[in-house]
Image (cartoon, grey):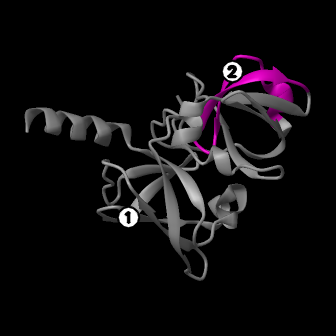
Amino acid sequence: MFTGIIEEIGEVTAIEREKSNVHFTLKAKMASHLKVDQSLAHNGCCLTVVEQSDTKYKVTAIQETLDKTNLEDWAIGTRINLERCMKADGRFDGHIVQGHVDCVATCIEVLDLDGSWKYTFRYKAEHQTVEKGSITINGTSLTVVDSLDGTFSVCIIPYTYEHTNFNEFQTGTKVNIEFDIFGKYIQKYLKKVG
């Protein structure tokens, strides 16, 4: 489990294809603190460390992961939001994030609000957002500002803008979305009893 509080931005340094799997090697300061078999959120997608050194580590994505995320768009040099799994004895700063991407959304507007930024995204999924509810974008825990069918917006403060890959987003950027877990359970329950 994760909280959506980004610890670091890593960089893709190698991509290897093996049958339907893709192995990504990333450079990150936290690499020396990782261990093989550890879960790590990459733009909100939970991947397992399969190799590790002092400066780099490797993860593997299977076809199911590639089909539901923006990992197919990664290239050498792509900057990735990273978060290690939540510590049981730590503060819960974001919201409950599983690292299971629900869909890919596309940025359709970026507004500079003179001190903050407002991003609007379009998605195709059965899930809903709720104004002032939680959403995870590329692994970052955020609050929904505007919520419509198939679109939503979030506002970003300067700290988040500088310490995540939001500063690279523009119209057309594809991002990983994980909807609020409680909202997904409520929606499933209502379908069942409806």
Q: Indicate the quadrant containing the C terminus: top left, top right, bottom left or bottom right.
A: top left
Dot 2 falls on a residue whose secondary structure is loop
Q: Secondary structure at mark 1?
A: strand
Q: Seen in the image, is 29 located left or right of residue 183?
A: right
Q: Please say whether residue 97 is one of the residues in the magenta stretch.
A: no
**Residue 113 rendering spot, x and y as whole percentages:** 55, 81
Q: Which residue is mark 2?
A: 38
The residue sitting at the bottom extreme is 114
Mark 1 and mark 2: Cα distance apart in space = 34 Å
Residue wearing tag 1? 151
Number of residues whose C-alpha sits closer than 10 Å to that of mark 1, classed few (under 14), some (14–19) or many (20 or more): some
- Residue 186 image position (x, y, % from top left): 23, 38
Residue nearest the viewer, comparing 106 with 138: 106
Tell which of 100 and 22 is nearer to you.
22
Q: Amino acid at mark 1?
A: Thr
Instruction: Kindly tell me whether residue 93 is visible in this rendering.
Output: no
Please name the residue shown 58% across and 42% down the image: 44
Instruction: Please state the extent of the stretch shown in magenta in the rendering.
Output: 30-53
- Give the number of callouts: 2
Name the residue located 46 percent from the left edge and 47 percent from the top edge: 103
Q: Amino acid at mark 2?
A: Gln
